[in-house]
Amino acid sequence: MTLYRLFVLFGGLIVLALFAALIAPLFIDWTSYRETFEREASRIIGQKVKVNGEASMRILPLPALTFTKLSVGANADGSPMMTADAFSLHAELMPFLSGEVRIVDMTLTRPNVIVDVGDNGSIAWTMRQESVVDPEKVKLENFAIVDASLRINGLAGGRSLMAEKLNADVSAQSLFGPWRIDGEGLAEGVASRFTVTTGRLQPSGTVRVKMVSEREAVPYTLSLDGPVGLKDDILSWEGQFDLTPLGKQERTEADPL
């Protein structure tokens, strides 16, 4: 059963369950859904997804699912590509019945992501197997990423890049875009903030990405603008970047990091 059908079935079951929910406990055991979530999430991401903690569902006031202690994929050394303390989402009920997925609120708590770049520039995260839900019908109103960390290994010269204590607010009109990400955290130990916006995914398989980033005590703004896509399963970007000096007045009036 595809995730699309699960969403439709899920919506119908919720309608039937609403009456019972008025006299039943607010939370019900949803552990039996865990294996289905793991299987379908693995198909979407293209990496094995495992729920090592609890799974729960809430009917009112909005349908909600929560999973704890997640792990995704495996690196060459056997360590997970990503772990997270918790993943939760709240969705509107009625769109489920027409096959649409409208996520009102979603939170990913303390994700730890490790990206290993291969000798040819490939990364395992781009090896998604298939899409089992229509990306056009998924709307993400508010996605909060809380206390995240990211490590990228295998960069030029054997370097690694580390970012931590990342917090971001994400929204998307559909999974095809446009997307917007506003975040802040520590990049190589330096307080930074960033904004990322995208266009829609094009038939060519590329999406235009704009990013503006500022670092604490550094008198310039870094801007990137250009299309991102996959070439032979290798993530590629072609565009331009600018370093714009900040005037004394601009630095004084800027929001604190």
Image (cartoon, rainbow, N blue to C red):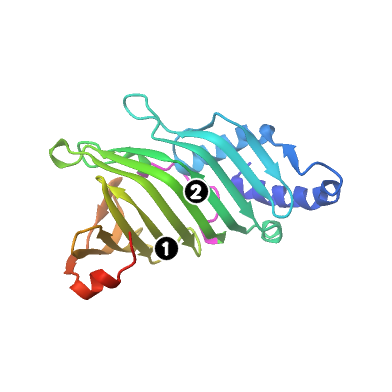
81 lies above or below 139: above
Let me know if residue 64 appears in the view.
yes
Is residue 240 in sight in this rendering?
no
**Residue at numbered disc 2:** 131
Q: Which mark is residue 115?
A: none
In the picture as drawn, the residue positioned furthest to the top comes out as 78
- Callout 2, which amino acid? Ser
Say whether disc 1 or disc 2 marks the residue closer to the N-terminus: 2
Q: Amino acid at mark 1?
A: Arg
Residue 173 location in percent, x, y? 50, 65
Reply above or below: 171 against 64.
below
Q: Which residue is mark 1?
A: 180
Residue furthest to the left in view is: 157
Q: Mark 1, mark 2: which one is toward the viewer?
A: 1
Neighbour tally class for label 2: few under 14, some 14-19, many 20 plus, Cα within 10 Å = some
Q: Determine the residue located farthest toward the front in the rendered image.
A: 252
Marks 1 and 2, how far apart at CA: 22 Å
